[in-house]
Image: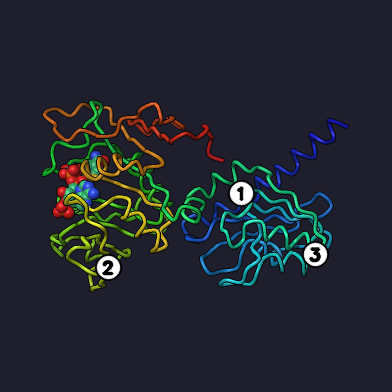
Amino acid sequence: METDSILTTNMHELFMSRAIELAKQGRGHVSPNPMVGCVLVLDGDIIGEGYHEQFGGPHAEVMAMRNARKDPVDGIAYVNLEPCCTTGKTPPCTAALIENGISEVYVGMLDPNPEINGKGVEALEKAGIMVHVGILEKEANRLNQSFNKWITHKMPWVIAKVAQSANGYMGLDSETSIWLTGDVSRTHAHTLRSEVDAVLIGRQTALIDDPSLTVREVSGENPKRVIMDTNRTLPLSLNIFNDKKAETYVLCSDKRFSKTKTHFCQYLPVREENNILSPIHVLESLAKEGITSILIEGGQKILESFLSADVIDQIFIYTAPDILNDAHLKNPIQLSDEWMISEEEKLGDDTLIIAEKGVECLQEL
Ligand SMILES: NC(=O)c1ccc[n+]([C@@H]2O[C@H](COP(=O)([O-])OP(=O)(O)OC[C@H]3O[C@@H](n4cnc5c(N)ncnc54)[C@H](OP(=O)(O)O)[C@@H]3O)[C@@H](O)[C@H]2O)c1
């Protein structure tokens, strides 16, 4: 009896982890929506699978129905996020499950969106469907951590990324552009870019490095680009203003400017405090633009400012094997006790450390 129930639990987790795997295929394409996957099971066999592929496109449950190899009547649905019960860009998913005669639904986690939270489950139960919530809940939460934070706190998930020398310097000085880490780290960092909605840098980094901030080493969508330039002094000859590869925001002082869009970029005024742009207001403003996750790529002053505002959720430190002599640009990130190292890996000759605040160490699903 006990063995039976363990087997059943494992089976539910197996189907749910498949739903999570499917959901991941939407990464980089569905934001600001969450990533959702759905598996339809009949008599113990998977008869249909689907995921939310594109923002504005059909949701996972509808895709799974469309892809079903058999009539799903009396089938069981596994979905990592509570099915929606509202009409947005598409009809409610609860209707798709009810209309197709699904008898049971296993849900990874409730939708934190207050418009849906619990109401999707209620609608299914009202229609006589048995609902079980919380299968692989931790993993389901983890998958959509950006969406969860954005929808509940109206702030994006914030990742700080830094490349440093073996002796902890992120460059020689503010005026010099220098490459520290190797090709494997570069590819890894491009994957990271492809997984966020936006990348943010400071005025000096834009000026000195003249980066594109695009995804080139792997396939994936380019994130939006965000540059903090209080007084709009950056020259319009920079790559970000001319390559047309991604939407570009320039954050500037609300004391002098108002929201405007030009041929080069979108100017977004944010609160200026003590002669710099307020990190908290920067994040609130970007959240309003639908940005659910942001990668802060530097430089030193920007990192310092976001660190002291205590708004960073996750840190990626890429460390090169070589010492940088006569350097002045110290990496300001100190992994104090509140940070937990969740991953450490070798990337060619470099080492990557990923740290997070107060979360359990979880392997990537
Ligand atoms: N190793 C790495 O991972 C890495 C990554 C990126 C950059 N870098 C290097 O870092 C150097 C540039 O760093 P940096 O520290 O000199 O400059 P930075 O952080 O790139 O830019 C700082 C400038 O951003 C503007 N800013 C607006 N709001 C701000 C805020 N809240 N906090 C801080 N700055 C704000 C200020 O200019 P305004 O007042 O004019 O707006 C400030 O002077 C370059 O050498 C670059 O190559 C290294």
Mark 3 vs mark 2, CA separation in Å: 47 Å
Q: Secondary structure at mark 1?
A: helix
Question: Where is residue 184 shown, x and y percent of the image?
Answer: 35, 39
Amino acid type assigned to the residue bearing label 1 in the image: Ile
- Local SS, label 3: loop
* Residue ID for mark 1: 20
Q: For residue 88, what is the image quadrant? A: bottom right
Pointer 3 residue: 127
Q: Which mark is residue 266?
A: 2
Q: Which mark is residue 6?
A: none
The image position of residue 315, as x and y in percent, is 37, 38
Depth check: give the residue in front, 32 or 239: 32
Dot 2 amino acid type: Gln
Can residue 209 be seen? no
Q: Pointer 3: residues within 10 angstroms few (<14), some, or many (20+)? A: some
Badge 1 or badge 2: first in the primary sequence:
1
Q: CA distance from mark 1 to mark 2?
A: 35 Å
Taking 56 as reference, is 110 above or below it? Answer: above
Q: Is residue 312 left or right of residue 21?
A: left
- Quadrant location of the N terminus in the rendered image: top right
Q: Quadrant of the C terminus?
A: top right
Task: Indicate the position of residue 13 as horizontal and vertical percent values.
Answer: 70, 42
Q: Nearer the viewer, mark 3 or mark 1?
A: 3
Percent x, y for residue 131? 76, 53
Image quadrant assignment for residue 93: bottom right
The secondary element bearing badge 2 is classed as strand
Residue drawn at x 35%, y 27% as measured from the top left: 336
Q: Are marks 3 and 1 in contact (CB under 8 Å)?
A: no
**Camera-nearest residue between 164 and 231:** 231
Q: Is residue 195 left or right of residue 40?
A: left
Please name the amino acid that badge 3 sits on. Answer: Ala
